[in-house]
Image (spheres, rainbow, N blue to C red):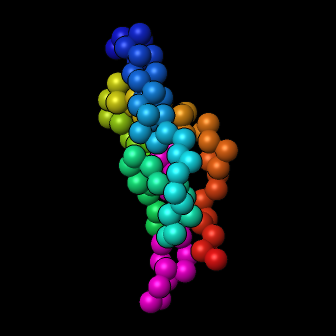
Amino acid sequence: MNGELLIVLFVIGILLAEYITGRPSGEISALTQYPNQKLPSMFVGWGAGEITQMYHIHHWMWCLVSSFVFALFNQFEIAAFLVGCFVQGLTYPDKFHIIVDRR
């Protein structure tokens, strides 16, 4: 395993996540209360008849879990890339804001 390659993939993960998620400041979605992005954010919601509870699954959450899974299977290059995406996700001020206010 090449350490320099892992560092490069880590940095590419940061840069690609920043490019894809960006810092949207445009129109706010009525459903999610988040700005529209290049790729839509992931939300989980449920309720009886209508969505009453909604949770934002930030990309840093699934990147962290995925990086551990890939590392367990010795896919360290993919894990390094995903760790870069994870680190970029922690730069947002709302990184721990998970429950979406539906009011």
Left or right: residue 23 compared with residue 72: right
Quarter placement of the N terminus: top left
Rendered location of residue 22, percent (x, y): 49, 39
* Coordinates of residue 54 in the picture (x, y in percent): 53, 70
Q: Residue at x 41, y 54 (%)?
A: 40
Q: Nearer the viewer, residue 57 or 20?
A: 20
Pick out the residue farthest to the front.
27
Query: Is residue 46 found inside the magenta-colored segment of the image?
Result: yes
> Can residue 72 be seen?
no
Answer above or below: position of 81 versus 36: above
Farthest-out residue, right? 93
Could you say where residue 25 lies in the image, as x and y percent from the top left?
Answer: 56, 48
Q: Is residue 83 above or below residue 34?
A: above
Depicted 24 relative to depicted 82: above or below: below
Which residue is drawn at the image coordinates 46% and 67% (left, top)?
44
Q: Which residues are magenta?
A: 45-61
- For this rendering, which residue is in front, 92 or 90? 92
